[in-house]
Image: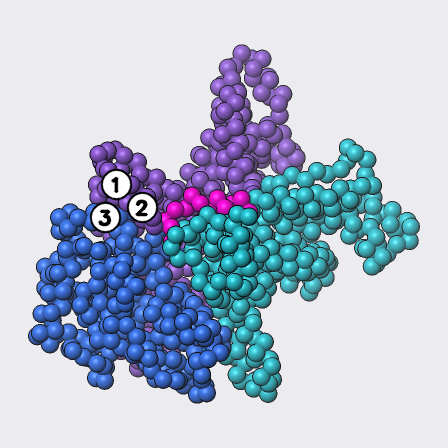
Amino acid sequence: MKKLILTASLLAIAAGAASAQDVVRMGTEGAYPPYNFINDQGEIAGFERDLGDEMCARAQLTCEWVINDWDSIIPNLTSGNYDTIIAGMSITEEREAIVDFTQAYYPPASSLFMGMSEDFTLAGAVVAAQTNTIQAGYIAASGATLMEFATPDETVAAVRNGEADAVFADSDYLLPIANEDADLMIVGEPVQLGGGVGMALREGDARREAFDAAITSMKADGTLNALILQWFGPDAATF
Amino acid sequence: MFAFCTDPATLDPLRWFSCYLTNGAHFLFYQSFLVVFALLAVTAPVSLAFGFAAASASRSHILPVAWLGKLYTAMVRGVPDIVFFLFFILVLDQGIEYLRHQIACPEWAEEIRQGANFLVCPEARTPSSNAPQWVHEVYGFSLAVFTYAIVFGAFCGNVLYGAMRAVPHAQLETGAAYGMSRAQVFWRILVPQMWIYALPGLGNIWLILIKATPLLFLLGIEDIVYWARELGGSRNSVYQYPHPDWRFWYFLALLVFYLCLTRVSEIGLARLTGHLSRGQATAAGDTLRKAAT
Amino acid sequence: MICAEALQDYGLRALGIGERLLPQTDISLCQQIVLIGSGMMWNVYFGILALGFGFFFAVALAVAKASPARLIRKPAEWFIFIFRGSPLFIQFFMVYEAFVMLPRVGIEFTFLGVEIAAETRWFARAWLGALIVLFLNTSAYTAEIFYGALRNVPKGDLDAADAYGLSGWKRFRRITFPTTMRLAWPAYTNEAIFLFHATALVFFSSFPAFQQRGDALYYANYFADRTFNPFVPYPIVAFYFVVLTLLIILIFGRINVRLNRHLPNGQRTRLRIRPQLMR
């Protein structure tokens, strides 16, 4: 279940050694549409795929995509299994302590509860969330009963089968699901969490500046906003 | 795949399914079945070799070698195989990198194990982080195969050791009486004869091995279980072929696949037993002899 | 007392009692030993209950498979083939998905009331769902063992029973069944051992760990992930399982002695533990 067991070693932390790398391995989850997912052709697709390819092109880096389970996605970065995480990861203080983030490429999004019935109160409820997400941390601190799953899909399935009263996740992930499934609806109040979504690199990795510059230039010429609107719909928050 | 697949949303169910089941993601799913067969094809002979070495070692007259052989074959008895799988793959990976680290950068001053991290110098990283993705995948698969071979080698060692003891002792003594050396008795009398005694046990291990292949998923290999879970999960309209949660049906397909594999193996093993029983001093061999006359 | 603090915090963690958060950093050896041991409770729970219920179902299945009536024999044969011929891992996945579908199917039968709906969700929990899978699985393996033993009951025993005027249920209970047990016991001991080993798969096969309440291997894997050091948690699990295995051999050995107590010394079957029944 965990790919980190395959390779457990750390790449040189020194910036000099890092810049000698000619291939950048981009780690993503591949199970969080529309951020990133495996499409019907069996390729990694989604907002972050398009964004990442564009960033690599602008930073003049050769990039390669790697899939890794969410719950081990940070340990595998620090141990050098790949060089970046671009997987809808919100920028938080706890994560900042372990990895370096680029500037946000997606503005702070609200998190929503999705359930099967309108009468939902957080206190005393059983809420499903994905392991190691800011949403899971929020539920654990709130006093509600947290049910953790390894993949986002399983959290939604837990609500459908009644195991959990609601699922708590990014609005961009939940809204398309709620819109298409008559049984599921958004319940409760939206919650603002995190400081936007950024790309994570190992601490001290010099390529962070290159990616940061690429995001800045994409923000400046409007390509980033165009991508956001393309993948998240016309109502999405832009820069 | 088909020309009419350009707009799946408009298709009737039959065509929709023929397009859905032949899209790129499904071809990766079908390819992953080859991973299972590759695992079986490589693991079976390697485990047999491990088992043979272990069984031979257990018969050794040098005590430490015999102990080593017996310890190895005994280890699978008390502990679940899955614990070994999860343990060995990590140990192998760290072991390889540790050895390469010692060779490639002896002057490296820092500790390798720092808290939660296992740090070796860049030259010792296996595979090199510059390597293309397929090298990473092949390396991961090889580690998995080796892990399987260690565990199943211990199983085979058990069976082969028993089979070696089952070969009639009088035959070995006859060999010695003809002036054969120990090695000659071993290779010319014991080894050719032991297979028929080993076959029921080895057949059993083969069936167990088949049933252990889905554990590849736990070792981080994108195998049939990974793809069944991935493709079966409910999909919204971001995908070309949206569908509800179909994981049950995908796992049902895997179940049927394994049942077929088991059945075919059972039939094949029955034939092999008949083949090997010819001319043997066993009840089955006797039956065959009587049937022939 | 060493480990007292860890024992207090995590001794019953696998049941959801104690510290809410698992140890994150500076994980001590004590915490690993205690938490993995706490998880062992689940392995023992699954093993004992599946084995206990499975025993009776297996006897029924074995008798059904030995039945001359096709209508009884065939279903038993198929049941045994399906559960012995496929990986337990896949069975877990499939049955979990089947149980997950239950309430959604149940929505069509709203007249069944709320109580039923509240109960069907338990099937998707490990404590019931995984137990059912293990129960069915061990029943199939055990039934095959019992079936083999049933066919090897000496004809003389049955003739003697006839001569004494025993027949039907009485003959089965007094003669056939005890002899079957005696013949099957060594193989059944193996099955018991490997069933306990199989319980380690539960939390790796889709049954979610509810608030991180898992079995021994679940915690061992957690520690291996956190510390990147497999040399501590896995040997701890191995140690626990070896102890458990020895306990099983001890208990089953006692029963074996009792089953064989009427036989002269030379004819008694001894337990030989062979790894032939792993799934």
Disc 2: host chain? B
Which corner quadrant holds the N terminus of chain A? Answer: bottom left
What is the chief secondary structure element of the magenta stretch? Answer: helix
Residue under label 2: B114
Q: Position of residue C3 (x, y in %)?
A: 51, 50
Q: In the picture provided, is B266 more to the left or to the right than A234?
A: right
The residue located at (21%, 84%) in the rendering is: A234
The residue located at (25%, 68%) in the rendering is: A91
Kindly state the secondary structure of the residue where label 3 is placed: loop
Kind of residue at badge 1? Glu
Q: Residue furthest right?
A: C164
Q: Which residues are magenta?
A: C226-240
The numbered disc on residue B110 is 1
C13 and B51: which is toward the camera: C13
The residue located at (67%, 60%) in the rendering is: C53
Q: In the picture provided, is C99 more to the left or to the right than A19?
A: right
Task: For chain B, give the colour.
Answer: purple
Residue under label 3: A11
Q: Residues under labels 1 and 3: Cα distance?
A: 13 Å
Q: Is residue C230 magenta?
A: yes
The numbered disc on residue C111 is none
- Are dots 1 and 2 on a single chain? yes
The cyan chain is: C
